[in-house]
Image (cartoon, grey):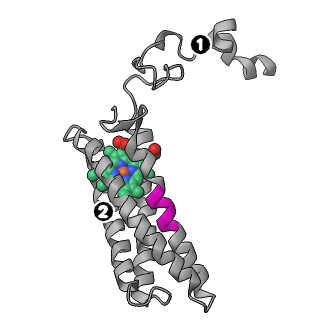
Amino acid sequence: MESRAKLFGHPIHQMLIVFPLGLLATAVVFDVIGLFRADGVWELMAYYLIATGVVTGLVAAVFGAIDYFAIPGGTRAKYIGTMHGVGNVAVVALFGASWLLRRPEPGNPPFEALLFSFLGVLLAVATGWLGGELVARLGIGVDEGAHVNSPSSLSGRPAGENRSIAGFNGPERRYGAAAAYAGAERRAR
Ligand code: HEM
């Protein structure tokens, strides 16, 4: 199902999610390093990473929601999308709470602040998988008719064009599909 919010022919949500995922996960890595160091520098960096991760997460969520509302109701994709969306809002909320708890002394976060961050990143592993399920398994954010020979997203032509030659551009076309796929059997004979 084609994305409703695209830039240069690709879904904006998929472009933006790298920021919250990367920033928030790195914040947790820095917190862990900070546990072994006494200067508070790593926790301070985590504090700024979390702030940026939360803001970019909220921006990414807007474009995810645009695609989510276009998914037909009663489908598995709608169900997975709901779990993914709600779960990711919870991820952002956990990191937001962690950031607020750090504010009085960013270089020396309380236990609860670390707990919320660590829970947030664990939850993000699950919600990230659900996002992958939406795209790779359920075809959300994938152009209608996409195939291995689809024309460029910038061409303005539908992804389904050239389907008749899809998969038959390489050895299959030169030798025929059966011959191209019979390599192992032929060699074994
Ligand atoms: C910080 C928040 C979020 C993160 C980190 C995130 C992450 C992801 C990831 C990793 C994917 C898979 C992308 C791929 O495999 O290329 C994805 C896809 C998707 N997400 Fe999110 N997501 C967030 C928020 C939301 C929200 C709030 C919604 C809906 C209410 C949503 C709806 C979708 C949809 C519909 C897709 C399918 C692909 C597309 O339409 O672009 N996401 N998301």
Q: Main secondary structure of the magenta part?
A: helix
59 is higher (above) or lower (below) than 36: above
Q: Is residue 132 visible?
A: no
The answer to whether the beta carbon of the residue marked 1 is less than 8 Å from any atom of ligand 1 is no
Where residue 42 appears, x then y in whole percent?
57, 80
**Horizontal side of residue 39 vs 82, given as left or right:** right
Between residue 8 and residue 123, name the one nearer to us. Answer: 8
For discs 2 and 1, the disc positioned in front in the rendered view? 2
Q: Secondary structure at mark 2?
A: helix
Q: Quadrant of the N terminus?
A: top left
Residue at position x 43%, y 53% in the image = 17
Residue at position x 51%, y 72% in the image = 27
Q: Which label was assigned to residue 154? A: none
- Badge 2: few (under 14), some or many (20 or more) residues near its Cα, within 10 Å? some
**Horizontal side of residue 79 vs 10, given as left or right:** left
Q: Which residue is mark 1?
A: 168
The magenta segment is 19-25
160 is higher (above) or lower (below) than 68: above
Q: Tag 1: residue type?
A: Phe
Q: Secondary structure at mark 1?
A: loop
Where residue 111 appears, x then y in whole percent?
43, 89
Q: Which residue is mark 2?
A: 89
Residue at position x 43%, y 45% in the image = 14
